[in-house]
Image (cartoon, helix red, strand yellow):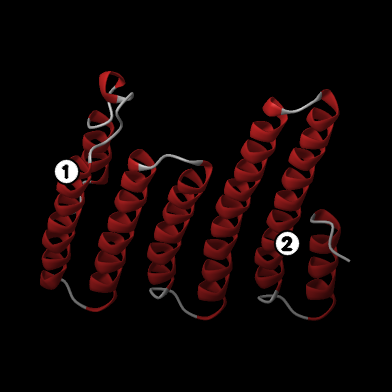
């Protein structure tokens, strides 16, 4: 099986946007060349999955697709860098990791599989929540730079709110994992497990 070498691709993207070229940015020709390279490597990686079968093949294909998406998002961020493209690259990474993790959960059964799925979702929620918080903070900082001290205070408040929202999303996802693990129990032990999880993750 030939894996899509995401690190090599991202390095190539970085080299196409070296310090000496930053004033001009990445040319459309460079962009298209790198994009074609990503597509070529993806096709090769996907073809390598054909030698596998069952869930192993599904995992392989999900991995190839995910790495292609991440590479393209990284390319977009280098070609037209912005708060939005940086956010989209982080989301692409979260989605890629989630797709592979979910496929791996298919190797499990019963409550083990349910917990696996919840854990995969929790990891994705954490990653996207952090990405959103970073995006909101970056936007607030950019506005604050151009405005008064009063705007600086407002920007800081927005940043705090963004991180609080992210923390709330993460706690909810972690609670879902803990609650799913409690499903393996029964009776009063199960009830106590869920109650403890609610307290631990601040869920009413």
x and y percentages locating residue 124 in the rendered image: 54, 58
- The image position of residue 101, as x and y in percent, is 42, 63
Please report contact status of discs 1 and 2: CB closer than 8 Å, yes or no: no
List the single residue furthest toward the right.
204
Q: Residue at x 48, y 41 (%)?
A: 82
Q: Is residue 125 left or right of residue 48?
A: right
Q: Earlier in the sequence, mark 1 or mark 2?
A: 1
Q: Which mark is residue 191?
A: none
Q: Nearer the viewer, mark 1 or mark 2?
A: 1
> Residue 29: which numbered mark, if any?
1
Q: On the rendered image, what quadrant is the C terminus found in?
A: bottom right
Residue at the spot x=53%, y=81% of the render?
Answer: 110
Q: Secondary structure at mark 1?
A: helix
Residue for point 39% across, 59% down: 96
For image coordinates 80% across by 69% down, the residue present is: 194
Of residues 132 and 83, the one drawn nearer to the viewer in this rendering: 83
Q: Residues within 10 Å of mark 2 (few under 14, many from 20)?
A: some
Q: Would you identify the image quadrant in which residue 24 lies?
A: top left
**Would you say residue 60 is visible in this rendering?**
yes
Disc 2: which residue: 172
Label 1 and label 2: CA atoms lie apart by 45 Å
Q: For residue 122, what is the image quadrant?
A: bottom right
In the image, residue 168 lies at what x, y percent? 76, 55
Q: Position of residue 58 (x, y in %)?
A: 28, 73
């Amino acid at each position: 099986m030939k894996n899509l070498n995401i690190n090599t691709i991202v390095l190539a993207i970085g080299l196409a946007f070296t310090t000496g070229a930053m004033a001009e940015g990445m040319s459309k020709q460079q962009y298209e060349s790198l994009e074609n390279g990503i597509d070529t490597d993806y096709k090769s990686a996907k073809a390598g999955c054909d030698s596998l079968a069952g869930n192993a093949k599904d995992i392989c294909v999900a991995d190839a697709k995910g790495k292609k998406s991440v590479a393209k998002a990284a390319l977009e961020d280098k070609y037209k860098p912005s708060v939005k493209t940086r956010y989209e690259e982080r989301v692409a990474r979260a989605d890629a990791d989630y797709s592979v993790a979910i496929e791996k959960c298919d190797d499990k059964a019963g409550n083990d599989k349910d917990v696996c799925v919840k854990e995969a979702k929790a990891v994705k929620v954490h990653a996207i929540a952090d990405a959103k918080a970073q995006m909101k903070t970056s936007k607030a900082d950019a506005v604050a730079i151009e405005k008064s001290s009063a705007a600086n205070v407002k920007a800081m408040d927005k940043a705090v709110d963004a991180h609080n929202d992210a923390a709330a999303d993460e706690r909810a996802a972690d609670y879902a994992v803990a609650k799913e693990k409690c499903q393996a129990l029964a009776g009063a032990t199960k009830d106590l497990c869920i109650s403890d999880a609610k307290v631990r993750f601040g869920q009413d």
